[in-house]
C-alpha cells in the first residue's frame, strides 16, 4: 500500500506544469544622440508608455533612455541578474539600428561619425543581447525592436537598410517593427507607429502573445497602407498570456461554430469564427473564404502541376491548409500558396522556399513530438507497472485478510488508491495514443513529400547559452532520433511502425 501511495504522489506531481515566478522587462529608448542629425523624438515616449503598461501587467520594469554602449551593457547586467529563472523576460529597444556584415547593431547615443570602428565601439549587437536574454533561462524570452527607423548613415555604403533576421532558440520570440531590410516610421504623434499598435494590444486579456503580435502587425499594416509590415521570428512552445488567460471553452465549441460558419457561407459568419478563434484550426481556410466572398483577386501562384502534391503537404504542415479526408482542389492549394507568399520576404516566395520552410517546420515538430512521445512511453510504462503491482498486492491482501474484519479499512484504502492509479493510467494512455498518432502521421507525410528537402543543416541549433545544457543535449538527441526514424520509415514498407519498435527498444 505504501508503494502505491508513493507512485500515486509522484505521478500527480509529474502531471502538473511547473512555472517559474516573475516577469522582468528592460526598456531602452535612444533618441537624444550626440550627432544632432541622428536625433529621434519618440523613443523616450515609447519607453515611458510601455513602462506603465508592463507595470500594470505585473512586470518588474527598468526603463532607461539615451544610453551609450557601456551603459547598455550595464543595463543588461542588471537584467541578467534580475530575470534569472523568470517566467517572462522582455527586452525592448527603441532607437537607431543598422545591419553590417550580417550583424545588427543597436546604436548608442555617443555615436557621432558614420564609420565601422565607431559603429562597433558605440553599439550593442543583437548577438550580445540574444546571449543575455537566452542565458537567463526564462520560460518565455521576448526581444522587441522598434529600431529600424531612418538610416542615420545616409548613403554611406558600410551598412544596409533595416535589420537582418536573427532567430532565437526555443522559447524565444523576436519582434521587429518592420520586415527584414526595410525601414520603419518614427511616427508623427507621441509614439512610433509600431509602439502605438503594441500599446493598444499588449493589455488585451485572453490572447496568446503570438496572437497579440499578429494584431500589432495588422494595425501597423493598416495604418501605413502596407508600407510597414512588422516581423516576428519565434520558436515558442505552449501559450503565454501577458494579460489574463482566456476563459476555458468546451472542446466542441470551435467545431460547432465552424460548422455554423460553413452552413451560413457568409463573410459575417467566417469573421465571427475568426473573432472567437483568432488562431483556430480553420483560421487560414476562413481567411481564404472571406477573400473569395469579397471578390479579392489573387495573383497567380507560380506552381507547376507536378509540384502540387508536395506543395499541398507543405502548406498543410505549416498551417495554410487544413488536412482532411479528401485532397483540396488545385485552386484551393494555389490560393493557400499565394496566402503563404504574402507573408514571406521578397526573394524567398517560390516553391523551393516553401519546401525549405516546411522542412524546417517538420524538423522542429519532429524534434518536439519525438521528445513528447518518448516521455509518454516512459510514463505509460511506469504507470502500467505501478498498476500491475498495486493489483497484485491487492489480490494477495484480499486472500490473506478476507476473514479479518479489522483489515477492511486498509483493504478499502488500497482499493481507493488502485482506482486513482487507474484514472492516471487512462489519462497517460490517452496522451500516448495522441502523441503516437501525431508522430506517425508526421513521419508518413515527411517521408512522402519532404525527405529530399531535409538535411543535417536543417536540424535545429539549440543554444547552450541559456544555461540549461542538459535540455539542449536532449533536444539535439530528439532531433537525431526523428531523423533516424525517418530513415527507418524510408527503408520499411509503407505503414510500418519500425520507428516505434526502435523507440521502444531505446526506452
Image (cartoon, grey):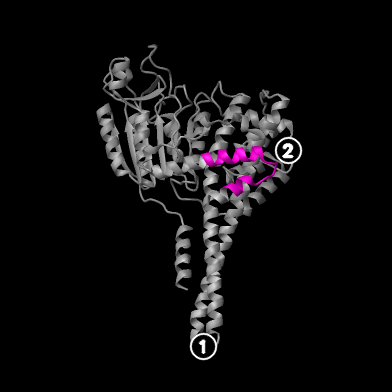
Q: In the displayed structure, would residue 436 be above or below residue 349?
A: below
Q: Earlier in the sequence, mark 2 or mark 1?
A: 2
**Residue ID at (26%, 20%):** 34
Residue 157's place in the image compared with 430, above or below, is above
Question: Which one is nearer the viewer's eye here, 464 or 27?
Answer: 464
Q: Residues within 10 Å of mark 1 (few under 14, many from 20)?
A: few
Residue placed under numbered mark 2 in the picture:
327
Q: Specify whether residue 486 is painted magenta.
A: yes
Q: Distance of mark 2 from mark 1, alpha carbons?
A: 66 Å
Along the line of sight, the residue nearer the viewer: 131 or 272: 131
Read off the residue under disc 1: 405
Q: Residue at x 35, y 39 (%)?
A: 135
Q: Position of residue 186 (x, y in %)?
A: 40, 25
Q: Where residue 383 sits: x, y (%)?
A: 53, 62
Secondary structure, mark 1, is helix
User: Badge 2, how many Cα within 10 Å: few under 14, some, many 20+?
Assistant: few
Q: Position of residue 321 (x, y in %)?
A: 65, 37
Q: Which mark is residue 98?
A: none
Mark 2 element type: loop
Find out whether residue 176 is within the magenta segment: no
Q: Is residue 251 left or right of residue 236?
A: right
What residue span does the magenta drawing correspond to? 480-502
Quadrant housing residue 326: top right
Along the horizontal axis of the image, is 39 left or right of 268?
left
Above or below 210: residue 299: above
- Residue at x-position 28% and y-position 24%: 109
Most frequent secondary structure within the magenta stretch: helix
Position of residue 259 measured from the top left corner of the image (x, y, whole percent): 69, 48
Q: Quadrant of residue 199?
A: top left
Can residue 506 be seen in the rendering of this structure? yes
Amino acid at each position: 500500500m505504501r508503494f502505491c501511495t508513493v507512485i500515486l504522489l509522484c505521478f500527480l506531481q509529474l502531471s502538473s506544469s511547473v512555472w517559474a515566478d516573475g516577469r522582468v522587462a528592460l526598456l531602452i529608448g535612444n533618441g537624444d544622440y550626440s550627432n544632432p542629425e541622428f536625433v529621434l523624438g519618440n523613443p523616450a515616449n515609447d519607453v515611458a508608455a510601455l513602462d506603465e503598461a508592463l507595470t500594470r501587467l505585473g512586470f518588474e520594469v527598468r526603463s532607461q533612455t539615451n544610453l551609450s554602449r557601456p551603459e547598455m551593457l550595464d543595463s543588461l547586467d542588471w537584467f541578467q541578474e534580475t530575470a534569472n529563472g523568470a517566467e517572462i523576460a522582455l527586452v525592448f529597444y527603441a532607437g537607431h539600428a543598422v545591419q553590417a556584415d550580417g550583424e545588427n547593431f543597436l546604436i548608442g547615443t555617443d555615436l557621432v561619425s558614420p564609420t565601422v570602428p565607431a559603429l562597433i565601439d558605440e553599439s550593442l549587437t543583437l548577438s550580445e543581447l540574444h546571449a543575455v536574454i537566452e542565458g537567463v533561462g526564462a520560460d518565455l524570452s521576448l526581444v522587441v525592436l522598434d529600431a529600424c527607423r531612418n538610416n542615420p548613415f545616409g548613403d554611406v555604403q558600410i551598412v544596409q537598410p533595416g535589420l537582418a533576421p536573427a532567430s532565437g532558440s526555443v522559447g524565444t520570440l523576436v519582434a521587429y517593427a518592420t520586415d527584414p531590410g526595410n525601414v520603419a516610421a518614427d511616427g508623427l504623434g507621441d509614439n512610433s507607429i509600431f509602439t502605438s499598435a503594441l500599446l493598444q494590444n499588449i493589455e488585451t486579456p485572453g490572447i496568446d502573445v503570438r496572437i497579440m503580435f499578429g494584431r500589432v502587425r495588422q494595425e501597423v499594416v493598416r495604418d501605413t497602407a502596407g508600407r510597414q509590415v512588422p516581423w516576428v521570428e519565434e520558436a515558442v512552445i505552449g501559450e503565454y498570456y501577458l494579460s489574463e488567460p482566456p476563459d476555458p471553452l468546451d472542446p466542441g465549441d470551435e467545431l460547432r461554430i465552424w460548422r455554423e460558419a460553413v452552413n451560413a457561407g457568409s463573410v459575417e459568419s467566417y469573421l465571427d469564427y475568426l473573432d472567437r478563434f483568432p488562431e483556430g484550426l480553420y483560421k487560414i481556410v476562413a481567411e481564404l473564404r472571406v477573400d473569395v466572398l469579397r471578390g479579392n483577386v489573387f495573383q497567380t501562384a507560380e506552381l507547376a502541376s507536378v509540384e502540387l502534391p508536395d506543395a499541398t503537404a507543405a502548406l498543410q504542415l505549416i498551417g495554410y491548409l487544413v488536412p482532411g479526408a479528401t485532397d483540396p482542389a488545385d485552386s484551393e492549394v494555389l490560393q493557400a500558396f499565394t496566402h503563404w507568399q504574402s507573408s514571406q520576404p521578397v526573394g524567398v516566395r517560390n516553391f523551393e522556399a516553401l519546401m525549405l520552410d516546411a522542412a524546417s517546420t517538420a524538423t522542429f515538430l519532429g524534434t518536439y513530438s519525438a521528445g513528447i512521445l518518448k516521455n509518454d512511453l516512459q510514463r505509460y510504462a511506469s504507470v502500467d507497472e505501478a498498476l500491475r503491482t498495486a493489483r497484485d498486492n491487492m489480490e494477495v491482501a484480499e486472500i490473506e485478510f478476507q476473514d479479518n474484519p479489522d483489515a477492511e479499512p486498509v483493504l478499502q484504502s488500497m482499493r481507493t488508491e488502485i482506482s486513482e492509479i487507474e484514472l492516471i493510467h487512462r489519462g497517460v494512455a490517452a496522451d500516448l495514443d495522441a502523441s503516437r498518432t501525431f508522430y506517425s502521421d508526421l513521419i508518413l507525410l515527411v517521408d512522402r513529400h519532404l525527405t529530399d528537402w531535409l538535411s543535417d543543416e536543417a536540424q535545429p541549433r539549440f543554444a547552450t547559452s541559456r544555461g540549461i545544457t542538459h535540455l539542449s543535449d536532449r533536444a539535439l538527441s530528439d532531433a537525431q532520433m526523428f531523423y533516424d526514424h525517418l530513415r527507418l520509415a524510408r527503408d520499411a514498407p509503407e505503414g510500418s511502425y519500425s520507428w516505434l519498435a526502435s523507440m521502444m527498444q531505446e526506452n
